[in-house]
Every structure is written in structure tokens, then in C-alpha cells.
Image: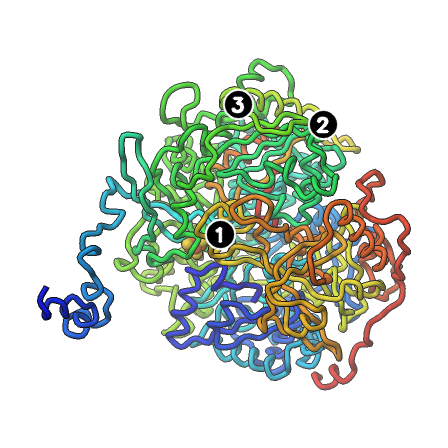
């Protein structure tokens, strides 16, 4: 679901085909019939943005028919844990959980805790959302004060145990409701349920694959939570052939998350410190509980080792290892906020390092107007991309919004070295690092990013040498003595040396470390990213391991190196039963060897090596020693997988069906229309199309979704310049169903244009049955699909599809909702120049779009009143919204009452 | 050519009578194609690499040859040893030789001054010096010492960076490290998209 794997990850898809050839059933659930659907056993179309309703239906089906893998669920998840009496569910509050603050649009999560009443996290929900806190748990789980002593009911009957809470929460997600919300027929839905449950259990496992079709939603993290809950209920996590597999879209996007170029993270998913952290001790206390279980309890070791790598000798015990050299965050510093700050004149310089936001980010116009209001912009790329040339080829030149002679931004273009002209590691989508050797030298001024950053740092240090200004200390103290190769003033820094320091060294002996278990908080170890510690184990660059697949078993531990500790299946202790025996012979992966008293198997066991299956920790014990023999989830504060998330997710402890920010449908389950915690930016330059209960949505009656093609790559910077790829996919097109084509007068291969309140985009029409109209709750909903790879540069050009989208974000990740919006489509080409601006203003006027549209996020009918939640509007922003718009009616409820029949049938 | 030889020169005859019944090897060869050599035959060496597009991480062999102008990439192929890709590459991975050797590659630093309408060339060391000054200037203009409550921030909002998912781990490491030391916090990449 949320993935067109055959198209976007074609070589990975060979394994799906291999599994199919060996008897696996492949189901593809996706709005559009794609290359993946064509090869699947069955395609189930659904309305874009309705996945949680379907997944909730599957959860309800499992629970009401006792189809869960009960032994696994009881032993390895938090199903039996009791939830606080103060917790109130969406069933009680018309689509909200307890703790909602309508003023800020965020949750205070303290009522979502377990019953034993340990205090909630100190930072309130608002701050968590601003800092994308949900994303900071990429390796260590969220904090709990204690991992032991939690009240449980092993019979799973207590009304407040997680199992029962889950059951009630999804009780109205019936096959009928799934049909009305998603447009999936009852028969298709039940076939999905049967296929999924019958392929799970002791003898079988089922894998769930997703991509950005799930993440790019205003509740993307909750889509994935919903999938994970099903996989846990069916016992499909930590077992061979199971899992929730994210397919990522760039060669090292996993690596750039682990070793983050992200504002809210330090390497290894340590959060960036917040302005309110008084010092190192306070910071460590805030990210892990004093009595919590597992390896995240040792966060201090990981932090100090990082600080020692950053600041070397200058990081001492006396100065808290230079912790205060780290700048503090205190809110949203994500890329979309930053671009709005550029427009508002608060940012002066911008580096673009292999990214092309003028085409690739949502709301391209916002991106380009931001770039046009800087002191300077640096673009480093292989080729001339749109983001480097916005001052002469942006669509805003034609509309007069950017005038080259009046655009003040200085632009530096630095040609980059390609993947064969430098050495280093990529981390692919399964956490595996693979080293690349340098094949040839780059030409002319082409340089690696390593070269660029290293020498920029060196020049900055040289310029500031001798400065007495305290703010220059972190830069002057920075350990920047990487080995270099070659002569002259600008030699190439050694990627190998950087990787060694990421792996870490014992500072007392100078030896490379073998594993993160050796890291210490007393300043005797340095490691740039604790989860990567071990990539240089034994002094060998394991990312360069290349034992042929034919010379090892299928786990292939000798090819590359996967973090952590070269484990290929995370939490693989769960592949054995509580007594440590494989659940079945067929699905054997890791088990307890009673004779040698240690864990063993085909993969590297993901558990303390000698903790026996029956081990029970003392009450009050903390860290890895507190893990019981049946606590496979060793990075979780309580050792269990979380069906219900008492902390760490900012928009609800359980996934809930909300409509997308822009939707033609009212929410049939709750008065709360869309995610109550989604992040909206109320600005003149970021208008939204209306959605129920607002009126005016009929002006944008169709569901819009966009995705990739095999033959191009993301924003096209690495594909539209290539003759082969451009020839294979030469032009932008829009897929519509024959029914919609008839309704709007669209002819195959003719021009049409797609319109939202932000932009209008030209494309060739492709009339195809791949797009199917959906019958939903007595109405027909049409969906429109476009690939998004084109822009004004390159061998083949086209309009920028991302211009159609506005900026509204998932509060956990601050990722934009770009997989679903509403739109109109009309035959013929769009107007150009100033006429285009007038055309869009006309659409907004007819739809009643104002700066407030879409920002009244709370629509549930509870005691709390309606409130506008948003960042402040910018009165002096560019005028994109006609001033004479009429305010939409935001008060009238427009939803069907909860369906009594559904409730009864399910009881 | 005699009649018999003439008949034997037909690929279909050879396919039906010879060992290559599928017509994928010898049966399909002609005198011309027999003389052909794979492009990789002239390679001096082969470098182990990884496809730079998506995160499947297909392994590549980069064939390198040389002439009097230096070393060149002759061909990029899938590495059959890989347990991930088994030697396969999709259209993008197969086109990566064109990606790295194509004419579209820029080789010179280019500079567009404020209010300019054309690119100008700039030499690399000069560009690095100009940039060093600008970074310090933007950092100063956006500096924030404390928040409204007097808590230390010690950061700049004047500098932002975007990109990293196409780069190496080692590069991302240095980017985050340097910008953090500068006090720049708005450091982002494609993972936010
Ligand atoms: S060859 Fe294709 S599938 Fe393989 S990594 Fe490259 S882009 Fe991805």
C-alpha cells in the first residue's frame, strides 16, 4: 500500500516476483492501477487518503474474529498493559483524544500514559509538534519513566487494557464503513482480510510494503502505525518474511536520516537540544527515563561520544563535554517554515546540496519566491537545475512576480562530483551501508561535497582564528583534522578517515571500536554516530564487504554492513517464542541455544547475547539489564511493541481515520473532519481548497494524487538531462478515467490543465481505465493522477506539478501532504502571464477561499469551542488571494451521524 | 558461396540444427557481430560502486579505461554478485553512464551577481573566499543569543541548507557538524519531503 514498487523500486520488486513464483499472494491496494497492480494477484483501488479507514477495518476484522496471533500478542506487545483512567478515546470525544488544546491545535499527552502513573514527558505537545518529535525515535524508542512495574491484565479482558482499548477504538470500522469511505467493495475488503490473516501465524508470515504514498499525508506517521498494528496483531514483526518495509527514494536518504542533515536531530537519532535544556544532564533526563529498559537508557554514552568526536580535546568533563557548543532549537525550523521565513526576509543565505526544491518540494512557487529574496544562494549539483536558474526561468518570470533586473539574490553554482568520482558510503533502504570506490577523478571545478564542506570549514576557521568572540568558540574548537589526499591548498579529504571517526575510536588506545556497546560517557570514546559503530569493526571497512551471494546464505551478512551491529532483521528475538524456540521450523531465524547458553541463528541476534528466555529482571532495574527474556523490543522503554503508543506520537496514541486536509468528503466516522493536530500555515501565499464543513469545495471536485515513473528521478535533476531517459518518458501527462474525460470534455493526447487554488498546470491527457471512478456513500468521486518530474530545464520540459500543492504537514514528521489534494481539470492549455494570476484568483473567489480556509482545524463537537490554529498570517506577503472573497461558512456540521447499524452488526 | 553454405548462413537453420536452440547465442551471430567486442573489453580496471538513484542500492561495476586525455568511464553495469540486485539495473541505473559522462555536466563555477541577467565564470578559490565572507555575514545578521525568557539559543537563523539524500554518509556527517558549529539550525534534506 502507498507504494508502486514495480515502478519506483523495480529491481527490489524482483523479490516480490520471486516470492510470488514460490507461492506467495501479492495484493496491491492503491488508488490507481499501476505496473505493480499488473503483476499482483489482485489490485484493490481505494480513494487516495482513506487508507487508515481500510486498515482500521482490517484491525477490527482481526479483533472481532479472534484472528490475532494471541501468544505473540500477549508476550511481545503492550496488549495487556492498562491505560490511565483519564484517557478518553475518539469514540468518546467525536474524533478527538483526551488532552486536546483547541488554542494551539496540539495534544497534552499526559492522559495517554499507562496506569501506573509515572509522570508524563516534560515538554508539552505544542513544542513536540514544532520540533517534529515523532521523528526523533528512529533508533531509540520514546521515553517512559519506568519500563518495569506497569499494571497488566494477562487475560486481556480488563476494559482499560490496551487490547480492549484497541477493540473499542476500531469497533465502527466495519466493512460497510470501509466501503462508504474508501470505495472498496465488501467482497474486496474481506478478500484482503482473509489473504492477510491466512498468510500469518506460526507457519507463515506476511510483509507490508509502503513508500511515500503513506508518508506524504497530514497523518502519514499514523498510516504506518496502523500498518504496524496489523503486523503486530498477526505476529509479523521480527520474523523472516514479515515486517513493515519502507522503500525510500534516494540512494542515501536512509543515511541522511541516520546521520541527519535534519534540524531536529543529531547523529543516531539523538534529538537536537531545546532552549529549555539547562545542560547535558537535563537533556539526557528528557530523552530517556531513569528506570526505563533497553539500550536507549545509555543515551548519555552515545551523546558524549558524539561530543568528543565533534570537539575533541576541547570537550572535557568540566565543560560537560562542550554540550553548550550545540545551538538550541525552540520550534519549527523545518524546510517549509524556513522557506516562508525567506519570503519574510529573515533568512540571508541558502545552500542547496543536491536538491532541487523549485521542482521537488510542495508549493514550488513558495520555494522560488523564497529563493528570490535572499542575499545569496549556493547550488551544488551535477547539472544546471531549476533552483539555480529561478532568476531566469521560473514560471514567475512570465507572470511578472520575479523580474531578473530587480531580483537581488547572488547565486553561486558549484559543479559537483558524481558517485563514481568520489568514494564513500550510501545507506540503502534496509539500513545497509555500501562503500563505493572512486573510479575516476572529477573534471574542472567539479568537487565532492566532502571537499566543499571541509574547505569551507577550514577557511572559516582560518578567517576567525584568534577571535575572542564567544560565539566563534564552537567553530574554532571543532575537530577538523581529517586526513587528506593530494597536495596544494585544496587537497581531497579522506572519506575513509571520516567513516572511521563515525565508527568511533577508543581514545585511550587509539583503536577503532567494534560496537556501540563499547561507548562510554566518561570521555574515553569518540564516535560520530553510535548506531554506525561497528562498520569498522576489527579495523575492517565492512561497508566494503562484497562476498558474492552465491557464496553465502540468503541472509547475506557478508555483503555490506547494516546498522545496528550488522543485523538484517530488527527485533529478531521475536522470531522465537517466549521460551526461545523458533515459532516454526519453516520460519526459523534466531533462537536460544540452551547448551551454550546464548542466542544464535542465521542473523545477528537482536538481544543481549546471554540473557536467557526465562529471565526476569528485578523491580526497579534499568537499561539492558532490565530486559526480561521475553522483551524482544530492546530499544523500547518497556521492551514491548506498542499497539497503543503512550508517548512519542503527537497526534494520537492510536491511528484514526481523518479526511485529508483537502477532501470532497465529510468524515463519516466523527465530527472531527481532518487531523486535529495537522500543521497548517495560514498565509496569503499558501491558500487551501475548501473541505467540509466549509462550503465551496465543489469548485475543486476531484481528488488529486501524484507519483513517480521508473524512467525519471524525483525532481528530474538526474534524469531530464539524459537522452535515454527523456526519450523513454518525454512529456508530462495526466491520467483520467473515461468517465471523467467524458464529463469534462477531455480527449486522449490533447492538452488539459489541472487547477488548484495555488496553480494551474498543463499536461497531455491520457484517458485510461487505470483510473477508476469510485462510488462512495452514494456519490461518484473521480481521481486524477500525474507524475511530477518535469520543470522548465532539461532535454524534456513541462509544468511543475508540485506547484499545485499547498503546505500542510504531518505533525510528527513535518512532511507535507502531497499525496492527496483536491483539484479541477479543464480541456485546453492554461492561461499565461498575468492572465494566469487572474484565472487563479477567479477560482479562489468562486470557492470562497480566504486566508482562513482550512485553518479551523477543530470541527469535533465537544465542549471546547472552535479556534483558528495557525502561524500568524503575513499581511505583507504577496497578494495571491483576491481581497473581495467571502468568508466560508465554517460552522455548519455536514456529516452523517454515526451509523447505528454498523455498531450493532459489529457488537 | 555454395548453396549449402548459403543455407548454413541462415540463422534459423543454425538455430534448428545446432546447439543454440533458443537462438540467443551462436545461432544469431553474423560475421560482423562475431568481430565485435564488448565495450568493457578495453577496461583497465573495474571499480565497485552503487547506483546513485533510488534506495534499493543496486551494485554497479564501473569499467574504467584510459587514453592520452586521462581516465574515463567506459561502461557501468550491474554487479551480479549482489544479494540485493543480482546484477540487474532498471532504466535509471542503466543510464547512469550517461549521467556521469554526459554533456550536461557542468565543469565550471558560475556566478550570477545580484540583479544580473547572465552567468559569469568565477575561479574556484575566489568563489570559496567570497562564500566564506558571506557565510559569516549571514550568520551575524541572523544571530540569536537567547530566547525571550533569556534561555541560551546561541544560533543563527540567517543560514539554511537543504539536501543530503543524494550524498554520502561521510558528507552528511561533515555538513551537519560544520553547520552545527556555526550555529546554523535550519539544516534539512529530502527526508523531510
Ligand atoms: S538501478 Fe533502479 S532500482 Fe536499482 S538502485 Fe538504481 S534506480 Fe533503484
Quarter of the figure with residue B152: top right
Q: Residue at x 58, y 17 (%)?
A: A464
From the top left corner, tell me how far across and down residue A730 is, in percent: 52, 55
The crowd level at tag 2 (other Cα within 10 Å; few <14, some 14-19, many 20+) is some
The subunit carrying tag 3 is B
Q: Is disc 3 surrounded by few (<14), some (14 to 19) or many (20+) residues within 10 Å?
A: some
Q: Judge whether residue A812 can be spotted in this image.
A: yes
Q: Which residue position holds label 3?
A: B122
Residue A258 location (% of width, % of height): 52, 46
Question: Is the residue A486 above or below the residue A331 in the image?
Answer: above
Circles 3 and 2, Cβ within 8 Å, touching? The answer is: no
Where disc 2 sits, the SS reads strand
Q: Residues within 10 Å of mark 1 (few under 14, many from 20)?
A: some
Residue at the image point whose x is 63% and y is 25% from the top: B113
Asked if residue A438 lies left or right of residue A44, the reply is: left
Q: Secondary structure at mark 1?
A: helix
Q: Is residue A87 left or right of residue B4?
A: right
Give the x, y percent position of residue A561. Answer: 38, 49
Residue sitting at x 39%, y 26%: A484
User: In the picture shown, does residue A101 fall above or below A454?
Assistant: below
Q: Which residue is mark 2?
A: B145
In the image, A562 versus A731, the foreground residue is A731
Depth check, mark 2 against mark 1: the one in front is 1
Q: In which chain is the residue bearing label 1?
A: A
> Taking A844 as reference, is A376 left or right?
left
Q: Which residue is mark 1?
A: A726
The reply to whether residue A288 is visible in this rendering is no
Amino acid at each position: 500500500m502507498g507504494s508502486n514498487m514495480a515502478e519506483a523500486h523495480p529491481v527490489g520488486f524482483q523479490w516480490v516476483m520471486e516470492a510470488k513464483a514460490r507461492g506467495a499472494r501479492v495484493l496491491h491496494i492503491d488508488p490507481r492501477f499501476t505496473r505493480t497492480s499488473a503483476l499482483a494477484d489482485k489490485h484493490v483501488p481505494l480513494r487516495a487518503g482513506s487508507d487508515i479507514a481500510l486498515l482500521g477495518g482490517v484491525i477490527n476484522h482481526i479483533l472481532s474474529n479472534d484472528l490475532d496471533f494471541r501468544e505473540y500478542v500477549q508476550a511481545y506487545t503492550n496488549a495487556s498493559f492498562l491505560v490511565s483512567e483519564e484517557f478518553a478515546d475518539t469514540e468518546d470525544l467525536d474524533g478527538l483524544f483526551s488532552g486536546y488544546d483547541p488554542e494551539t491545535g496540539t495534544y497534552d499527552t499526559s492522559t495517554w500514559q499507562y496506569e501506573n502513573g509515572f509522570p508524563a514527558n516534560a515538554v508539552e505537545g505544542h513544542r513536540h509538534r514544532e520540533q517534529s518529535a515523532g521523528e526523533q525515535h528512529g533508533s531509540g524508542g520514546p521515553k517512559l519513566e519506568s519500563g518495569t512495574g506497569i499494571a497488566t491484565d494477562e487475560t486481556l479482558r480488563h476494559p482499560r487494557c490496551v487490547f480492549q482499548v484497541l477493540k473499542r477504538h476500531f469497533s465502527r470500522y466495519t466493512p460497510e464503513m470501509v466501503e462508504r469511505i474508501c470505495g472498496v467493495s465488501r467482497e474486496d475488503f474481506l478478500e484482503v482480510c482473509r489473504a492477510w490473516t491466512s498468510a500469518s501465524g506460526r507457519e507463515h508470515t506476511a510483509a507490508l510494503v509502503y513508500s511515500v504514498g503513506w508518508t506524504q499525508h497530514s497523518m502519514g506517521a499514523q498510516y504506518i502505525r496502523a500498518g504496524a498494528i496489523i503486523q503486530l496483531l498477526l505476529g509479523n514483526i521480527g520474523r523472516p518474511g514479515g515486517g513493515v518495509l519502507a522503500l525510500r527514494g534516494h540512494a542515501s536518504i536512509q543515511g541522511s536520516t541516520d546521520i541527519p542533515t535534519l534540524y531536529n536531530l543529531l547523529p543516531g537519532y539523538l534529538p537536537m537540544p531545546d532552549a529549555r535544556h539547562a545542560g547535558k544532564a537535563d537533556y539526557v533526563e528528557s530523552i530517556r527515563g531513569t528506570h526505563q529498559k533497553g539500550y536507549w537508557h545509555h543515551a548519555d554514552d552515545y551523546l558524549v561520544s558524539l561530543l568528543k568526536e565533534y570537539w575533541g580535546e576541547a570537550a572535557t568533563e568540566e565543560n560537560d563535554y562542550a554540550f553548550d557548543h550545540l545551538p538550541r532549537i525552540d520550534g519549527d525550523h523545518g524546510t517549509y517554515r524556513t522557506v516562508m521565513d525567506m519570503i519574510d526576509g529573515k533568512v540571508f543565505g541558502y545552500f542547496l546540496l543536491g536538491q532541487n526544491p523549485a521542482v521537488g518540494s510542495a508549493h514550488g512557487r513558495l520555494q522560488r519566491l523564497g529563493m528570490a529574496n535572499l542575499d545569496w544562494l549556493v547550488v551544488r549539483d551535477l547539472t544546471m537545475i531549476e533552483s539555480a536558474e529561478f532568476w531566469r526561468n521560473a514560471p514567475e518570470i512570465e507572470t511578472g512576480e520575479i523580474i531578473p533586473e530587480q531580483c537581488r539574490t547572488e547565486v553561486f553554482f558549484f559543479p559537483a562530483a558524481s558517485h563514481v568520482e568520489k568514494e564513500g558510503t550510501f545507506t540503502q533502504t534496509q539500513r545497509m551501508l555500501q562503500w563505493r570506490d572512486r573510479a575516476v577523478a572529477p573534471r574542472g571545478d567539479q568537487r565532492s561535497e566532502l571537499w566543499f564542506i571541509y574547505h569551507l570549514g577550514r577557511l572559516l576557521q582560518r578567517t576567525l582564528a584568534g577571535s575572542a568572540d564567544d560565539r566563534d568558540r564552537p567553530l574554532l574548537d571543532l575537530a577538523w583534522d581529517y586526513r587528506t589526499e593530494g597536495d596544494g591548498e585544496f587537497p581531497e579529504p579522506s572519506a575513509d578517515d571520516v567513516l572511521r571517526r563515525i565508527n568511533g575510536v577508543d581514545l585511550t588506545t587509539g583503536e577503532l571500536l567494534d560496537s556501540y556497546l563499547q561507548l562510554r560517557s566518561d570521555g574515553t570514546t569518540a564516535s560520530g554516530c553510535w548506531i554506525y559503530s561497528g562498520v569498522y569493526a576489527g579495523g575492517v571497512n565492512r561497508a566494503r564487504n562484497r562476498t558474492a551471494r552465491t557464496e553465502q546464505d540468503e541472509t547475506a551478512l557478508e555483503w555490506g554492513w547494516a546498522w545496528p551491529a550488522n543485523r538484517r532483521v530488527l527485533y529478531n528475538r521475536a522470531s522465537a517464542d517466549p521460551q526461545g524456540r523458533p515459532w516454526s521450523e519453516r520460519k526459523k531465524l534466531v533462537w536460544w541455544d540452551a547448551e551454550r547458553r546464548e542466542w544464535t541463528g542465521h542473523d545477528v541476534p537482536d538481544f543481549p547475547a546471554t540473557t536467557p528466555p526465562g529471565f526476569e529482571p528485578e523491580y526497579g532495574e534499568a537499561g539492558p539489564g532490565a530486559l526480561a527474556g521475553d522483551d524482544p523490543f530492546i530499544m523500547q522503554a518497556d521492551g514491548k511493541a506498542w499497539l497503543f503508543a503512550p508517548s512519542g506520537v503527537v497526534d494520537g496514541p492510536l491511528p484514526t481515520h481523518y479526511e485529508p486536509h483537502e477532501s470532497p468528503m465529510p468524515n463519516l466516522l466523527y465530527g472531527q473532519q481532518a487531523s486535529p493536530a495537522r500543521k497548517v500555515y495560514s498565509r496569503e501565499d499558501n491558500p487551501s481548497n475548501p473541505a467540509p464543513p466549509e462550503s465551496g469545495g465543489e469548485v475543486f471536485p476531484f481528488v488529486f494524487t501524484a507519483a513517480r515513473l521508473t524512467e525519471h528521478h524525483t525532481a528530474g535533476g538526474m534524469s531530464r538531462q539524459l537522452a535515454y531517459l527523456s526519450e523513454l518518458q518525454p512529456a508530462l501527462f495526466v491520467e483520467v478515467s473515461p468517465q471523467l474525460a467524458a464529463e469534462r470534455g477531455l480527449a486522449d493526447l490533447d492538452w488539459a490543465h489541472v487547477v488548484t487554488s495555488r496553480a494551474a498546470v498543463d499536461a497531455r491527457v491520457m484517458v485510461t481505465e487505470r483510473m477508476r471512478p469510485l462510488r462512495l456513500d452514494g456519490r461518484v468521486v473521480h481521481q486524477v493522477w500525474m507524475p511530477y518530474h518535469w520543470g522548465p530545464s532539461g532535454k524534456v520540459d513541462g509544468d511543475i506539478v508540485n506547484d499545485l500543492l499547498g503546505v500542510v504537514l504531518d505533525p510528527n514528521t513535518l512532511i507535507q501532504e502531497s499525496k492527496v489534494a483536491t483539484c479541477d481539470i479543464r480541456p485546453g492549455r492554461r492561461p499565461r502571464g498575468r492572465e494566469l494570476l487572474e484565472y487563479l484568483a477567479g477560482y479562489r473567489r468562486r470557492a470562497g477561499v480566504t486566508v482562513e480556509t482550512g485553518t479551523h482545524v477543530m470541527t469535533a463537537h465537544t465542549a471546547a469551542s472552535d479556534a483558528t490554529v495557525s502561524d500568524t498570517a503575513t499581511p505583507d506577503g504577496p497578494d495571491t488571494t483576491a481581497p473581495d472573497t467571502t468568508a466560508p461558512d465554517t460552522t455548519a456540521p455536514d456529516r452523517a451521524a454515526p451509523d447505528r447499524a454498523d455498531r450493532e452488526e459489529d457488537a | 558461396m555454395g548453396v549449402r553454405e548459403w543455407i548454413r548462413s541462415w540463422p534459423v537453420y543454425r538455430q534448428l540444427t545446432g546447439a543454440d536452440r533458443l537462438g540467443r547465442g551462436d545461432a544469431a551471430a553474423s560475421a560482423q557481430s562475431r568481430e565485435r567486442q564488448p565495450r568493457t573489453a578495453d577496461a583497465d580496471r573495474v571499480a565497485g560502486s552503487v547506483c546513485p538513484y533510488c534506495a534499493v542500492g543496486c551494485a554497479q561495476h564501473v569499467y574504467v579505461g584510459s587514453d592520452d586525455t586521462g581516465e574515463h568511464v567506459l561502461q557501468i553495469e550491474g554487479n551480479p554478485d549482489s544479494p540485493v540486485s543480482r546484477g540487474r539495473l532498471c532504466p535509471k541505473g542503466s543510464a547512469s553512464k550517461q549521467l556521469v559522462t554526459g554533456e550536461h555536466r557542468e565543469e565550471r563555477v558560475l556566478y550570477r551577481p545580484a540583479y544580473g541577467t547572465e552567468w559569469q565564470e568565477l575561479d574556484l578559490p575566489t568563489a570559496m573566499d567570497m562564500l566564506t565572507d558571506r557565510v559569516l555575514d549571514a550568520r551575524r545578521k541572523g544571530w540569536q543569543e537567547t530566547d525571550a525568557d533569556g534561555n541560551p539559543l546561541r544560533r543563527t537563523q540567517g543560514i539554511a541548507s537543504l539536501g543530503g539524500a543524494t550524498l554520502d554518509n561521510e558528507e552528511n556527517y561533515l555538513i551537519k557538524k560544520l553547520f552545527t558549529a556555526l550555529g546554523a539550525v535550519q539544516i534539512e534534506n529530502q527526508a523531510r519531503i
